[in-house]
Amino acid sequence: MIEPTLNDDGVMDFVASGVVVLDGVIDESFNRRCDDLAPGNCDAFIASEEFTRQVLLHPKVAGVARSLLGEDFLVPRGGHHHFFKEPHLGQTWHSDGLSGSGYDVFELQCYYYPHSVALEDGPTMVLPGSHCRAVDREAIAHYGDIRGQLSLTVPAGTVAMTRYGIWHKAGPKTNDRARSMIKFSYHRTAEPRRDWLCDSPEIPAYRDRPRLAYVTEVESYRDRVRRMRTWNWLCGIDQEVALRWEKSQRVSELV
Ligand SMILES: O=C(O)CCC(=O)C(=O)O
């Protein structure tokens, strides 16, 4: 039985940022089993009994998947090893896919680092909050540094779990030390409902998170609406979010 590990605040944080980072959770003896992994497709390794037990069903990793994807989520049976050794200038910003049709959370894309990653190693960079924006992949490639970007400089055994659609890239690498990232995705099968760690049955309204550093006033309003819709969706509430018109009245009440 996989137990959820996030409470309302943890889920609300994820709704806003699109990322949960679990520092150094995977056992060092298993991290070293990844030392000789070839770059590229690594379906067989990810589907192996050992990877499944040590990483995919690790209580902290699977607990986040259970919190955000509900019961009986799909456990990955394949993935990709992103491997860099030589120095390089870094990738351009991109997203691998869309976050579903907008507010739903059907997929969690995860990055597992079997070695520690320092700034010189070319860490993955993510842009918290960017998962809400359905954009043309090429349209974001020209951005340089963005205020609030997060370089995943992490201890060995870290797993970052992201909402599919988050903007990310491999950052610039200035040394020739091997840097590994193993990428895989969990998927939802259950209807959404608030069945993570809850201490009361009443569903709280979304408590908004601070405006992100790169976000302007108008866009922060839009972020708020997107976050409320995502929260409602996750809680199984089929209700449109009314903000500007919440005090409006039906015409029949006025005539
Ligand atoms: O290796 C990395 O840090 C990111 C690579 C990646 O996500 C990609 O190529 O899509």
Image (cartoon, rainbow, N blue to C red):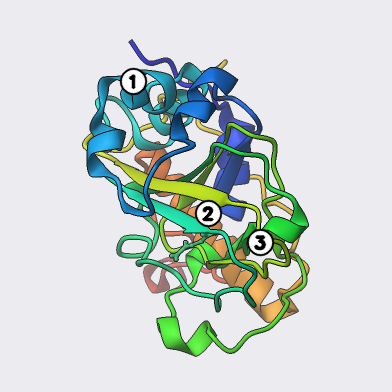
Instruction: Calculate the distance from the C-alpha at mark 2 to the C-alpha at mark 3.
Output: 34 Å
Please identify, in this view, whether the residue under mark 2 or under mark 1 is nearer the observer: 1
Please identify, in this view, whether the residue under mark 2 or under mark 3 is nearer the observer: 3
Under mark 3, the amino acid is: Gly
Residue 180 x, y percent position in the rendering: 52, 48
Under mark 1, the amino acid is: Glu
Viewer-side residue, 240 vs 224: 224
Viewer-side residue, 250 vs 192: 192
The residue indicated by pointer 1 is 50
Instruction: Calculate the distance from the C-alpha at mark 1 to the C-alpha at mark 3.
Output: 28 Å
Q: Residue at x 27, y 40 (%)?
A: 188
Q: Residue at x 33, y 20 (%)?
A: 50
Label 1 or label 3, whichever comes before in sequence order: 1
Q: How crowded is the residue under tag 1: few (<14 C-alpha within 10 Å), some, or many (20+)?
A: few
Label 2 or label 1, whichever comes before in sequence order: 1
Q: How many marks?
A: 3
Instruction: Calculate the distance from the C-alpha at mark 2 to the C-alpha at mark 1.
Output: 39 Å
Mark carried by residue 122: 3
List the single residue furthest toward the top: 1
Mark carried by residue 228: 2
User: Disc 3 beta carbon < 8 A from ligand 1?
Assistant: yes
Name the secondary structure under disc 2.
helix
Q: Are marks 1 and 3 in contact (CB under 8 Å)?
A: no
Residue 4 x, y percent position in the rendering: 46, 21
Is any atom of residue 243 visible in this view? no
Relative to residue 29, is residue 70 depicted above or below?
below
Relative to residue 198, is residue 231 depicted above or below?
below
Name the secondary structure under disc 3.
loop
Residue 200 lies in quadrant: top right
Q: Along the horizontal axis of the image, is 172 left or right of 96?
A: right
Label 2 or label 3, whichever comes before in sequence order: 3
Q: Along the horizontal axis of the image, is 69 left or right of 208?
A: left
